[in-house]
Amino acid sequence: MPSLRLPRARAAGAAPARRTKTPLGRITATLLVGTLAALGPILEGALGDGRGWTIGLLLLLAAPSLARAGGPRFHPLDPETYIPATYFLSVAYSPVLRLLMSREFSLSSHETAAMRVAYAGAVGCAIACTALSRPQEAPDTQRMVPMHRPKATLDQDWATIIVGMVGLGLVATWIVTIGVGRFFALNYASNHLEADGKGLLIGGWHLIGVAVVYLLLRAASLRKAGLAVPRVISLAGLCFFASFLLNTVMGRRGPLVWLVLSIALAVHAYGIKIRRIWLAVGMVSVVFYGFFVEGARAEQGKGIDAQISSASAYLDRIENPLEIGELQRVYANLVTIVNERPPIISYPGESWVNAFLILVPKPLWSERPLGLAQQYALWTAPDLARRGAGFAMGAATEGYLNFGLAGTAIEIAVFSAFFFMLPLLVASARGSPLLVRATAVNLASFAYNQFRGELTALLKIAVSLGIALLAVLVLTSVVAHLRRGMAALGPTRKSSGRRQRDPRLGPSSALGR
């Protein structure tokens, strides 16, 4: 029989009960941000030459931070700021810089057309980030540090370390298939081509990345509880982190940058404050690191001294450090696609369908479809494409090729919501376990990389991280079973070695114990 629950009387002088926020606030904020979508066409009609699209795009990307659930704030690690900023870098940084540096303060007709597509993506990004915004929650420290074994290395710690070692093994296997001597003698392009069709081995980096972030969060949770960090956790975390330096030798800037970004996102979501001055230093360091690695690529495979000299010469030739070649190339591809409309897809939505088909390993399906980047390379540079090369194909570009402006808005909204915003919300939820947090921030750290990429690559990353998560969970159960089994055998071994005393002799004396 249902019981009647009467409201409790409030004591005199007690503070009034806080009203819980209803979903209507998010709906209203999302509708307000959605209305800004009409601002770009109005401004472009009044100003022309790409100025209106640019101003409208900047306002849209600032809107999620202003409409943030926890109150207006611009923090580079908040999801409402971080995700729009990464989209801006991938598609709008170069044209905005060109607009500001031009004498007429205008863009060409070709660039204006591309900026219109970028604006459509900004609409999708702003709406998704505003609709999903949630206040950050303090972590449940009691759940993070089990009270029954506060100082012990947990079963999940050992399982994560094992998964990280498996990741190292996969990468080492890839290097062995190339040959260790030949691996360090390859130039940058050849190194990339050697990775084609070996995604299962290259995916080992994602397993290592999850291990690094998990172990760091484990150490942070222990330190926050005032406990010492087990030496095995510190040593394993440092070794796994150091292994990522191999990517620098390979001429790849991204993996180390994404790992550091994953760590920063994880620490921020855990509630540990990072001073903005250190964030600024980190951003400058990332730019310098990118220039250094790009300069060293020219002499890759010719020895450390040659690479350092090449990097130094490249840094000396830089006239404007704000002009970043990678961002310019990604935007140039967008301009080419929008204005020349190459026939690289057979039907609307083809690249989205192929993104799932390409998940089948190449050894199992040698004739699997090509990614959009490789199809674009076949159209613009067939000789390079025949050797497996591909050009960066941004998500905004892919959406536009499939369904025009609507396709761009949809693809960017889906990327922002499901692959970046939701993982960061999970990472900052109060009850999220450390392993889930580590996996989530690893996925979200690829926001810039995948805004300038295509759906295929993002799905591969998501699958690799999912495998890492599942492997840790399974191994945790195995380690726990083994530990319980060994604990059960312990007393038996101890009693088996003890001399059996005849009860007729009476109790043993204290001196004999």
Image (cartoon, grey):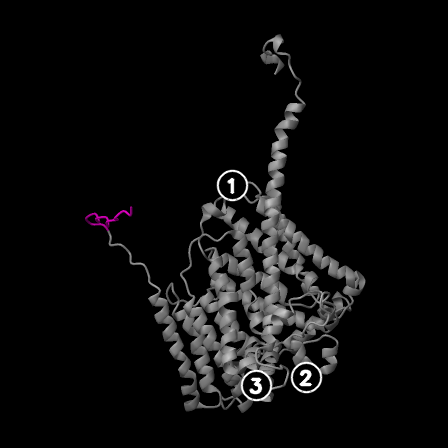
Closest to the observer, 262 or 8 = 8
Closest to the observer, 125 or 278 = 125
Give the mark, 1 or 3, whose residue is nearer the N terminus.
1
304 lies left or right of 130: right
Can residue 74 be seen from the camera position used here?
Answer: yes
Is 35 magenta? The answer is no
Q: Do the residues bearing badges 1 and 3 touch, measured as CB atoms within 8 Å?
A: no
How far apart are the alpha carbons under marks 3 and 2? 15 Å
Q: Residue furthest front?
A: 1
Q: Residue furthest top?
A: 505
Residue 348, horizontal then vertical, whole percent: 57, 80
Give the mark, 3 or 2, whose residue is nearer the N terminus.
3
Q: Residue furthest left?
A: 12
Can residue 453 be seen from the camera position used here?
Answer: no
State the mark number for residue 338: 3
- Residue of label 1: 150
**Number of other residues with Cα within 10 Å of mark 3, as a class: few under 14, some 14 to 19, many 20 or more:** many
Please state which amino acid type lies under the numbered disc 3: Val
Is 7 magenta? The answer is yes
- Residue of label 2: 379
**Number of other residues with Cα within 10 Å of mark 1, as a class: few under 14, some 14 to 19, many 20 or more:** some
